[in-house]
Amino acid sequence: MSDPLRIGFVPEHFSTPLHFAIEKFDLAATLIPFPTGTGAMIAAIEAGEIEVGIGLTEGWIAHLGKKKSSSTSPQTQSTKSDEDGGGNGDGGIHDFKLVGTYVSSPLNWAISTGLDRNDIQDVEDLKGKRVGISRFGSGSHIMSFVLAQSRGWLNSPSTSKSQNDTDNASSPSPFTPVPLGNFEALRKGVSHASHDPSSTSPTTSATADFFMWETYTSSKYHSPNARPHPIKKIGEIEPAWPSWMIVSSLSLSPPSPSSSSSPSRLTPLFTALDLAIEYFNHHRDESIAYIVSHMDYSERDARSWYEGVRFVRGGRTRGVRRGDVRGVVELLGRAGVFGEGEGKAEGEFGVDVDGMIGMSAVDY
């Protein structure tokens, strides 16, 4: 009997069907939480610490796209480091590929700053400012490029540049990224400690100006009475792609993306997830109660999120659609994630879409 799969996940409401897969449908897996998100999972899967990761689509694709597009450039390879979530020193060889789709609906990101930040009232005040991120290569980092592109701020004279941009080589950073860690550290980082009633620190200034995090995870702290580190919402952004995908180590991937069967160790994962998603969809009150009792959400927020989220249905977690991946590459490329590429088409970014995909799904 094979060992349980080591699965990395983000311990938020989206993980509920994954927990149900283990508790109700006998998935043999060890769940390893990554509170700081997809960027940390990338480092872990490349280090062999996990075999499967369930994380944000843009994080996986940005990393795979940059590694693939830089694999023919020795100069770019020499500048790669752990800061973008990589660090295996393999010169562009992927340690994982996209093998499944988990959530089909987009992720709504709240744009937040400190409650005490009177200097920041709306998104227009953020141009050229410091963005708090969980770590380099994370969704919170990649989305800063998407935000800048949506506002027309890329390549603007007042746009900041940093040596720690998304690939440490060619992409101008639309803001100055400040890696802060988990969600609590991000809230603290955008607040002036002297104005935070929950802080016992000496008077200090904020180390970042804003950050982006999932709306319902942020919602509880968009209140003057929230503790610790209350924040205020100044905007939101919702990219148009399926928000969560599944990756696996190359050791678990099939020899061909179009293979009609899953590797033996991945088959139980897709089977259990499909069953767990159906259970989640048909047991609303139980699913909401699970989120409220096991995670940091109010019943109101859990219920609102439940009504809007769409997990992949119909037994289709296995595989990714090339059209979905291509669409994300094009949007991230126009946002400058793969380099100075605003306005280019997919093939002009030097990104091999097919090379990212370990298991294909039929476009439906």
Image: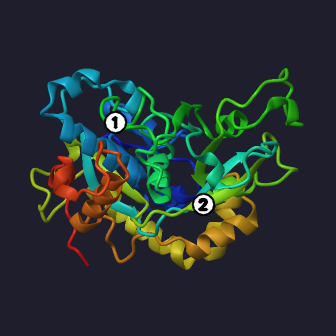
Circle 1 Cα neighbour tier, 10 Å, few/some/many (<14 / 14–19 / ≥20):
many
Q: Which mark is residue 236?
A: 2
Residue 122: x percent and y percent? 69, 55
Corner quadrant of residue 287: bottom right
Residue 195: x percent and y percent? 87, 35
Viewer-proximal residue among 301 and 192:
192
Q: Residue at x 10, y 50 (%)?
A: 255
Q: Residue at x 60, y 71 (%)?
A: 306
Left or right placement of residue 290 versus residue 152 in this view: right
Provide the secondary structure element on which disc 2 rests.
Answer: strand
Viewer-proximal residue among 95 and 117:
117
Vertical side of 252 occupied by 91: above or below: above
Vertical side of 327 occupied by 4: above or below: above
Provide the secondary structure element on which disc 1 rests.
Answer: helix
Q: Nearer the viewer, mark 1 or mark 2?
A: 2
Amino acid type, callout 2: Glu
The reply to whether residue 221 is in sight is yes
Q: Residue at x 43, y 50 (%)?
A: 55
Corner quadrant of residue 36: top right
Disc 1/disc 2 C-alpha distance (Å): 30 Å
Vertical side of 216 occupied by 174: above or below: above
Q: Residue at x 40, y 62 (%)?
A: 102
Residue 191: x percent and y percent? 75, 37
Amino acid type, callout 1: Ile
Circle 2 Cα neighbour tier, 10 Å, few/some/many (<14 / 14–19 / ≥20):
some
Outermost residue on the front side: it is: 157
Vertical side of 30 occupied by 103: above or below: below
The reply to whether residue 1 is in sight is no
Viewer-proximal residue among 47 and 74:
74
Q: Mark 2 and mark 1 in contact (Cβ < 8 Å)?
A: no
Check disc 1 and report the residue beneath it: 45
